[in-house]
Amino acid sequence: MGSATLRYFCYGCLFTSVTWTLLLFIYFNVSEENQALKHVPIKGLAPYKPLPKRFYPRFNRNSFQISDRHKNSQVRSRFGNHVGEPEEGNSELSPEMGMIFNEQDQKVRDMGYQKHSFNVLISNRLGYHRDVPDTRDPKCEEKSYPSDLPFASVVVCFYNEAFSALLRTVHSILDRTPANLLHEIILVDDNSELVDLKNELDEYIQTNLPSKVKVIRNEKREGLIRGRMIGASHATGKVLVFLDSHCEVNEMWLQPLLTPIKEDRKTVVCPVIDIISADTLIYSSSPIVRGGFNWGLHFKWDPVPLSEMEGSEGASSPFKSPTMAGGLFAMDKDYFNELGQYDAGMDIWGGENLEISFRIWMCGGTLLIIPCSRVGHIFRKRRPYGSPKGLDTMAHNSLRLAHVWMDEYKEEYFAVRPELRNRSYGNISERLSLRNKLNCKSFKWYLDNIYPEMQLSGPNAKKQQPVFINKGPKRPKIQQRGRLFNLQTNKCLSAQGHPSQKGGLVVVKDCDVNDPNQIWSYNEDHELILSNLLCLDMSETRSSDPPRLMKCHGSGGSQQWLFGKNNHLYQVSVGQCMKIVDPLNHKGYVAMAICDGSALQQWRFES
Ligand code: UDP
Ligand code: MN
């Protein structure tokens, strides 16, 4: 090449690179997403208005999305039937966060389910800080709150909580509460046995957390009811906020709770309890519902009567609730003491939420749910701990509340639980004199005025029903139907026995177009349903158990399957892929294993 040609060639290169740099510069400055992140107005364009925070994904979303119905249905399994159309919520986490890569991961996951009933592997991977989707109604963002709100002491009682979940609770409060409103966080260790909750927790708090966090240790296990009373007795804030030890508070959660308390100190308030899935830790929005109960004295969610939702603020305005779920609420501290705190004769867990709800309403207070305050809670399918003597504390506590507060209506409870009629329930004289001293109204007044929807058995049963906001649950759409074909063996996934047998195993068999035992449906909720009957399910506790056919529960997790790259079939709550155990064995057993992309783990739908 001559020197002139070389010179022109270099000019050419220079020109091309300058042009490209310019083009890239313009592209990055004009691209909408980039602008959204930079908040800088550009000449010639309309002033930039930032999108609400929820529109910015923080994790790389991959192709798998969990449908809204799925995300919200955890509530159904914890607190009875959920009602109303689930609200929109967006998942910012991949359901593959729980992928098991080695034996250590598997141990963390399996032990975690055993000790805590949720996916501790994902909880640990998330760390102590994360953003959660802002699930509030857009109207909430327009609201303003007084600047001189009373400051709060947050009381979190815990027993054997997973370290990462406890610290995420604490940090979410510190990260999303204005410092001037947060007086302190009081952690009450209810004599946990897990060692990391002792020295490691103290050390972490001493080195990393400001003076606002205090730990109180119970010398013996007291249960959450006395535990909260102990926490409250150490609190020096004006308002008490009680939270479970596996919560994450959302944007602007506290101000809307404190405002009604400031206006009327006898108002007790609950946030909307958003759902953190126990299997995926995905945070999603809860529908707007209120608290009720049944005659077995179990808490349940009810639709909100239309009459409660009227008014200009609609879905964003506080509404009355006959009962509270119990885990999360705020109350003026002096009013908590005046109203008799909790019944100290109640043990461990259960019933205290209905007791305090009845007491609030019957003794002159008000109980509200505040839709603009959102706090996520990990809803578990079972409680991982027992009570010290294996006692049914729920029955003991419910008996106490029935005898103190329910007057002649306790007969309704005994009609459901006749075996408890003559069961002893300890001394309730102090609680009876409290009721007397506070001059509380009758349970009949409560039913007539606060919960007229409650159905009575017997001749006085009311038939009238109020108008509810209730669109009913959606059925998930079927996305694929056909045989599930294993690429290595050319065999099809099938029920081992009859497809309607609950708990039955699945195996691979020679494919047969006419065999209904081999016809699977895959729906938008990622359930695999055999012959329109049962769902393919993985036990929540041990990833080494084989998948089984179980009743479809609609709560995701153990029945959620994802087809991934390499045709693998990934199980969300187990974090592993389905494979054929031994291709030469004619029994065709399948099991879960670390996803490795091998042909034994490859499955394809064939219509
Ligand atoms: N808890 C406690 N002592 C107990 C039982 C429970 O301190 O003996 C705590 C527990 O760690 C949690 C709260 O009380 O922070 C509520 O318990 P849980 O979450 O199991 O109840 P659920 O949410 O299922 O109603
Ligand atoms: Mn809880």
Image: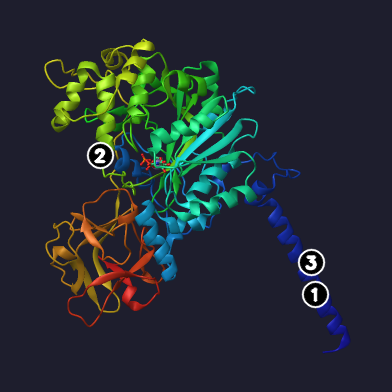
Question: Who's the residue at 29% across and 22% down the image?
Answer: 428
Classify residue 235 by image quadrant: top right
- Picture layout, residue 567 above or below residue 42: below
- Picture layout, residue 508 above or below residue 225: below
Say which of 587 and 25 sits in front: 587
Left or right of residue 121, residue 42 in this image: right
Q: Amino acid at mark 1?
A: Gly
Question: Which of the image's four quarters has the N terminus?
Answer: bottom right
Label 2 belongs to which residue? Answer: 392
Q: Mark 2 vs mark 3: which is more N-terminal?
A: 3
Q: Amino acid at mark 2?
A: Asp
Question: Which of the image's four quarters has the C terminus?
Answer: bottom left
Say which of 215 and 261 sits in front: 215
Left or right of residue 236, residue 83 in this image: left
Task: Evaluate whether residue 526 shows in this view.
Answer: no
- How far apart in space, not on screen, are marks 1 and 2 (Cα)? 84 Å
**Counting other residues with Cα less than 10 Å from the Cα at mark 1, is it few (<14), some (14-19), or many (20 or more)?**
few
Task: Evaluate whether residue 359 shows in this view.
Answer: yes
Label 3 belongs to which residue? Answer: 18
Q: Amino acid at mark 3?
A: Val
x and y, in percent, of residue 535 in the image: 24, 56
Question: Who's the residue at 13% across and 58% down the image?
Answer: 501
